[in-house]
Amino acid sequence: MTKDNFHEKITLVLSFLILNNYFFLSLNFPLLLIKINFLIFLAAVLIFYFQNISENIYLKIFFLFIIFMALGTASFGWDPRTIWLFHAKRIFFDGSIFSVADNYAPFSNNSYPNLAPAFASSLAVLIGHWNEVFPKLSFSLMFLPPLILTYTFLRNTQYLIFLSIVFFTIGKFMFNGWLDGLVAIYFGLSAFLMYLLMINTDNFYKNKSLFYYIAFCFFVSLTLLKNEGVALLLILFVTTFLIKIFKGELKKDISRLIFLSFSFLPMILWKLFCYSKGLDDAHINIDLNLSSKLYDLDSYKLIAYFMLLNEKFVICLAFFLLSFWINWNKEIFRFILIAVLMYILVLSFIFFTSPYGFYFQLDTAAVRLVRTLNFSLAFFGLYNLNNYRI
């Protein structure tokens, strides 16, 4: 592998192998192929580390620390133990992502997407047995593609600041078995690629097909991580569509948008399968009696408290606004502002229409979901400052 576009190429290889693992388990391929696929993934990781060992040293040291933390800690949260790792365990013993069709243990939300559990089960297949600690290392390994790609755009001190942002906004969610950190970083980099390929006026990235393949892989991965990944990707497409219409450029890039929109297909097929099997969460379950929530001032106070007044959100928002006060870039600001506002509205709608207790939903989910906003705001703020020239 040559030094030209090395980080982009290794990103594409790793992303493809993660999705290929999911594809193999979907079609019940022999376990030997699944082991080979995972071994190639690990070989690609080693190539990244030793191709030029002094290059991107910050990430290499940082990620070794994440690996040690992942192997040295167990998961205690409800979601990791009863959903993601439990699904991975079932896939490991049954050899297929479709083992959820029997709806065994419906409390584990069997209709949730299985990209990360499938990858975790394959690590267990490679090792030859299952325990409650090492399979979640695969969740950490899935952070590598977006982290590696970012080095293409941020170098040296800027990249060290980027890793500090990752640690600040995602932190323990890189190794504790939850998937919210993965959703945050895949959304942030998916938004960035959408901006580069569709919004940015610079034709350098628009003319490089490699970035479209990476974007496609990231988009598919985002939808197959968690259910909200579909909503997040849809927000990016709607935001891009609105900006393109406003600028009168939709016709010019419509073919690229159509190509990227096929990234929804794997998730659509998964949901059709779940619906055909009558899995609980595949059916829409919305509390339509909204009056008690919509007209209650305390509901909005709770949303502001748990989401908008979250201390990390305030810090990331302040950093984002400061960066654009220093270096005004209308294109980036408009793109990320529309996407963030749409995400807040979507989250608010979900909380308002949830059949569960309002306070319970905010207390358990808002702090995790807001990490996506935190990372995206801080990342785009840093990228904007990186382009600043005195």
Image (cartoon, grey):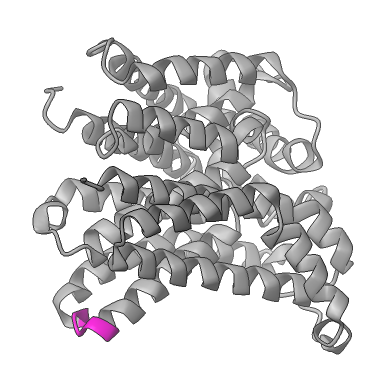
> In the rendered image, which quarter is residue 207 located in?
bottom left
Image x and y of residue 389, in percent:
21, 46
The residue lying toward the viewer, choosing from 70 and 113, is 70
Image: 349 above or below 190: below
In the rendered image, residue 248 lying in the magenta stretch gets the answer: yes
* Residue lying at 28% horizontally and 10% vertically, measured from the top left: 53
The residue lying toward the viewer, choosing from 100 and 14, is 14
Image x and y of residue 361, in percent:
81, 61
The residue lying toward the viewer, choosing from 171 and 73, is 171
* Residue lying at 25% horizontally and 36% vertically, measured from the top left: 152
Image x and y of residue 100, in percent:
69, 49
Image x and y of residue 259, in percent:
25, 65
* Labels in figure, total: 0
Say whether residue 247 is visible: yes
Q: Over which residues does the magenta segment extend? A: 246-250
Q: Could you tell me which quadrant the C terminus lies in?
A: top left
Q: Could you tell me which quadrant the N terminus lies in?
A: top left
Task: Report the magenta stretch's main SS.
Answer: helix
* Residue lying at 34% horizontally and 72% vertically, measured from the top left: 240
The residue lying toward the viewer, choosing from 347 and 301, is 301
Residue 374 located left or right of residue 4: right
In the rendered image, residue 292 lying in the magenta stretch gets the answer: no
Say whether residue 100 is visible: no
Residue 293 located left or right of residue 255: right
